[in-house]
Image (tube, grey):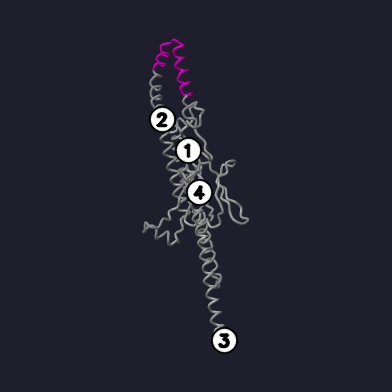
Amino acid sequence: MPNLSFSDTLMPLFILILFLGFLLFFYYVLMQKLNKKKVELKNNAACKKILKAHRWKLLTDYFWSNYMRFAWIMLFFTFFMSLGFALKLTWSIIFSLLLIIPIFYFLRFSIKSYKSFPSLAEKQLKKFEEEVKSAITNEISFKGDNIEVFSKKDDSFDTEPQLFSFPTGITKIAFPPFEQNAGKQPIISTRKLEFLVLSREYFSICQSAATFNLLSPERAGPPKHCAELPGRAGECHEHYYSQMRNVEYDDKKECIRIIYYDKRDDVEFPCKKAHPDRKAAMNALQEKLRLTERQRLQKIDEHEKYEEILKRRNAHIDSQNSSDSKEED
């Protein structure tokens, strides 16, 4: 039997370990892909379930979002009932009479859905917009402000922001059917809120909040099971009262214009003239402007008094120095 060297003995062991390592690595990669695929399939299944429930909701709770559904279904029932009676056969007449049962239940469902549709739509709208307003309040709150922290404990401090909301991008559902006057259509399909928020030292304009969509709400991706997204604040842009020169309403553009000192661009906030919050927002801004102007004038007055005191003090020091120099002479 030939003598094997030490290296020849270790070589098969090394190859075996390398092969086992490769198998373990391959198994790990394979399991990772299988687990990823399993999670993906699970998320997609959850998404399908959520979307199926939403489609069912459109056909039940929001059945009257498209009144032509009712028209087509009733046309279907009427056609087959008329056809059964027109054939004048025993089985066709019985079939037509039996159709009365599903027609009865369909009409009962339609009446119930018709009555509940406005309240369900309004409930969804209020829920979404309350979430947006809450998110806006959190967005403009500055937790490092000590006065804001103390104001929650002391009623003498009033630092709660004033929130004015203005709807844009409004579309309505044709309900009641055939109603052409938009003012008499109570159900809002889409609406976006833009906010003017007046804080203690600054005001914020928030125009990128999430848009409400009754029939097709925004949803998260498959990793979050296509859950319906809550109302979100978006971004807010801050502007300081100390830089304001005047506030006016532009009738042509239908917007609140905030005019600034120096060469800064004016700030315009779209706002319909008929909106109930327009006057309140204008009054609040003008009140802030008057307060800022009063504080500015007070600082100017204080500075003038300081200059006068400094002038008298310097004159007194000069007179003392001159008298001391005369005594020395």
Label 4 neighbour load within 10 Å: few <14, some 14-19, many 20+: some
| C-alpha distance separating marks 3 and 1 | 92 Å
| C-alpha distance separating marks 1 and 2 | 16 Å
- The amino acid type of the residue labelled 3 equals Lys
Above or below, 41 against 139 in this view is above
Position of 64 compared to 264: left or right?
left
Which dot, 2 or 3, sits closer to the camera? 3
Is 27 in front, or is 243? 243
Residue 9 shows in this picture: no
Q: Write down the residue under mark 1.
A: 214
Q: Which residues are magenta?
A: 71-97
The local secondary structure at tag 3 comes to: helix
- The quarter of the image holding the N terminus is bottom right
Q: Write down the residue under mark 2.
A: 113
Q: Write down the residue under mark 4.
A: 196
Q: Earlier in the sequence, mark 1 or mark 2?
A: 2
Give the prevailing secondary structure in the magenta stretch.
helix
Q: Residue 259: x, y in percent? A: 58, 51
